[in-house]
Amino acid sequence: MTELDFEKARFNMIEQQIRPWEVLDRRVLDVIASLPREDFVPERFRRLAYADLNLPLGHGQVMMAPKMEARMLQALDVQPTDKVLEVGTGSGFVTACLARLGAHVHSVEIIEALKWQARERLEAHGIANVTLETGDASRGWARHAPYDVIAVTGSLPVMEEAFKQQLAVGGRLFVIVGEEPVMEAWLYTRVGEDAWSAEALFETVLPPLVNARRPPRFVL
């Protein structure tokens, strides 16, 4: 595909996938339109960069479908002064979007190879307000808490309360909770020192974070 073909595919993705999924926030649409998603996918899937698919990244990980990324970004309502935690750097595309929307992103990736690939992509696009770290953040990442925004980009079979506790008052958390075939995306907002609101956003299926806690199994 030529650059013009990718530009057309990006336009079509926004108009045919993202807008129909009720993503109308102008800042989110502008950020997605400004970033060449094809530069963030594995080379062998470059032609599918704008398809309505979860794309494999290797190591058992996937890149969220574009409309899901967009819906998450809209729900989180990232502001220019926000400190952001991203759990699961993956391809680096969502990292780039969060960095363009917020003040600084702390992104944690458990797979070293994915972290370095993401670093190269972010540097190639001049995105510097990101700190990439290697680690297991499946049960929270207290190192830089509290956060204004937390984006968990893999599913959690069991909701981890640590993420809610690591929000600043007014902070927003996006997380997908459950096990296949029933998972639901949630937006939690910390409305007080000991109070949170919760909004169910949509049903989906996404691989769990590496080392995510599983519910107990009962055997008769």
Image: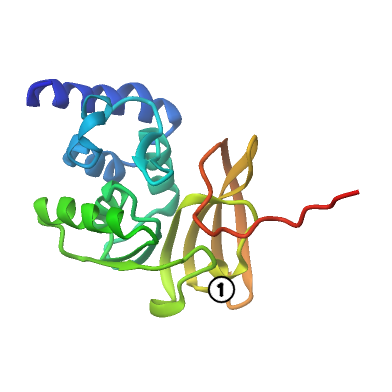
**Which residue is drawn at the image coordinates 62% and 41% (left, top)?**
183
The spot of residue 74 in percent (x, y) is 40, 46
Q: Which residue lies furthest to the right in this view?
A: 220
**Residue 146's x, y, as percent?**
44, 76
The secondary structure type at the circle numbered 1 is helix
Left or right: 63 as drawn, with respect to 42: right
Residue 100 in sight: no
Question: Quadrant location of residue 23?
Answer: top left
| Residue drawn at the location 37% of the way across and 40% of the way down | 70
Q: Quadrant of residue 185?
A: top right
Q: Is residue 18 visible in this depiction of the protein?
A: yes
The residue shown at (63%, 38%) is 180
What x and y, as percent, mark residue 211? 54, 59
User: Relative to residue 143, is residue 149 depicted above or below?
Assistant: above
Task: Report the front residue among 121 and 94.
Answer: 121
- Residue 23 is left or right of residue 99, and the answer is right
Total number of numbered labels? 1
Q: Please tell me how crowded label 1 is: few (under 14), some (14-19), or many (20+) other residues with Cα within 10 Å.
A: some
Instruction: Check the image and report above or below for 129 versus 214.
Output: below
Q: Is residue 201 above or below residue 17?
A: below
Q: Is residue 65 left or right of 34 when viewed as pictured?
A: right
- Disc 1: which residue: 165
Q: Where is residue 109 in the image (x, y as percent from the top left)?
A: 36, 60
How has the structure been colored for display?
rainbow
Q: Quadrant of the N terminus?
A: top left
Q: What residue type is labelled 1?
A: Gln
Residue at image location 14% in from the left, 26% down from the top: 7
